[in-house]
Amino acid sequence: MNDETPGEGARAAVAPRPPVRPGCKKSRRGRAAGAALGILLALLPAGRAAAQRANSVYGTGAPIYQDNLDAAVGGLTSALDALEQAGWLLRGSLTSVVQVSPGFHARINGPNSFRPGPATADTEELDLVLGRRLWKGAELIVIPSLLRGHGLSNALGVAQYTNGLAASRDRVWDAYVSHAFIRQTIDLSYDAFGGDSDPTRFAGPLAAERITLTAGRVSVLDFFDTNRYAVDPGSQFLNGGLFASAAFPSAADPRGGTNGVVAEYENRRWALRLGAFQVSRDIAAGSLDPQPLKHQQVVAEADRFWWAGQRPGAVRLVGGLTRFSTRRWDELTRALLDEAPEPAARARSQPMAAANAEQAVTDAVGIFARTAWNGAQVRNWMFTEADWSASAGLSIAGNAWGRFDDMLGLGAGIAGLSPGHRRYLAAGGTGSVLGDGALQYRPEKVLEAYYAVQVAPGAALTVDYQLIAAPGHNAARGPASVFSLRTNLSF
């Protein structure tokens, strides 16, 4: 593991996106916004930048402190550095995931079940990180993305889904703008001891004590519930219950992004973050709620960083409240049993909380743990059908066997449902992700192991295995095995 200053390595990978919900459609408004931002990007004056590259970790968009694919092309790294010096940013990555499920036994099957027969799925995602220096401390970042393929069982049937980059979509390429935001960094100390390996930042020194303000299209997981060892499905754990908290319903549209504003304070020992985000319209919508002042998600986080001897560690406490138009589980169950129409949705509030911790144990070994809970009384559709969850694991660098850039990860997760949520699924109801037609309840458990091989600068190949017990919290199904092969190329 890199012995970075505590707090600098946890946000190494930007925009880990949870599984994309079925039924999403392309957004003309999103494409128009992307085009307008592209024109603005070209017209704005350049600020000063200090580019530098050296050792770090993988991420969506090339890491800013590591040799990548551009190092294999003569003069390209120097050209990209010169571009940053001139106030422009260009990075990118291509990630491919192929998954195979050999099949498993299931006594119950329903419309949203994880399919028990042999199945394969693949996903390819291309991200370009485009940036422009505006004025001192200000950056405009736009990330156009291309996504192709689909997830196993159309990303349904498992609460802790098997591929955080997967979607329920056709196999054709889908173009969209995953991020488009302005970030202002305000230095509060007169030093260059701070750092951030976020690949959407211009490279260069940062003040140890600073305030960062971000506004635009982002992912909630860019800022909250991050972890050095389990945050990026493009390079670390693939499972949604390991790279994030399965029971933390982060606001998002069907592609995993949202619009919001975030304020952050950091001083290398502490960090405080506060954000407000637009929520999804409803369970069947392919867009965000058009009433952001009436319905929104507010999230706050407090981080504490330390050194245990020479080993960095951190703990993060997260809390939030989601206000959105939804229905209670008990109302939905009564309507289902009475064969009556679903009751009208009402504006309701859902609390949520999460905690996670990380600690480097040796130069090669790091451990992590997470836990989360949400209010569990109302139907939520923002990438979760778990009402409580916990996970833990470790990450081991290949130092011990002479492969310093390789990584081995081992993790386990468990997630469960509230009584009201159980009764609804047992009665034959379907949620945004689950619905087997009946339920023999048991908490869903996941084990995951991966080995990532650095085959060349900026090129990693990962083999991954997941074992899922009681998929969809249903003891009548599984266990299911999923084998994955992931390729990541970064420049």
Image (tube, helix red, strand yellow):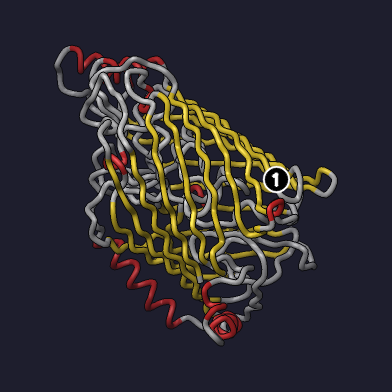
Q: Which residue is at the far front?
A: 401
Q: Position of residue 73 (x, y in %)?
A: 52, 82
Q: Is residue 289 visible?
A: no
Is 299 drawn above or below residue 131 in the view shown? above
Q: Which of the pair 6/447 is nearer the observer?
A: 447
- What residue sits right under mark 1 in the picture? 365
- Count residues near mark 1 (Cα–Cα under 10 Å), then give few for <14, some for 14-19, many for 20+: some
Q: Is residue 78 visible?
A: yes
Q: Position of residue 231 (x, y in %)?
A: 54, 48
Q: Which of the pair 267/406 is nearer the observer?
A: 406
Q: Which of the pair 290/489 is nearer the observer?
A: 489
Give the quadrant of residue 453: bottom right
Q: Which residue is at the far right?
A: 309
* SS class, disc 1: strand
Is 105 drawn above or below residue 260 in the view shown? above
Instruction: State how many labels appear.
Output: 1
Give the quadrant of residue 149: bottom left
Residue under the image location 30 percent in, 48 percent down: 121
Residue under the image location 51 percent in, 61 percent down: 460
Q: Position of residue 350 (x, y in %)?
A: 44, 29
Give the quadrant of residue 225: top right
- Callout 1 amino acid: Val
Residue under the image location 44 percent in, 21 percent down: 443
| Residue 288 as seen in the image, left or right of residue 222 | left
Q: Position of residue 362 (x, y in %)?
A: 76, 46
| Residue 336 as seen in the image, left or right of residue 300 | left
Residue under the image location 57 percent in, 65 percent down: 63
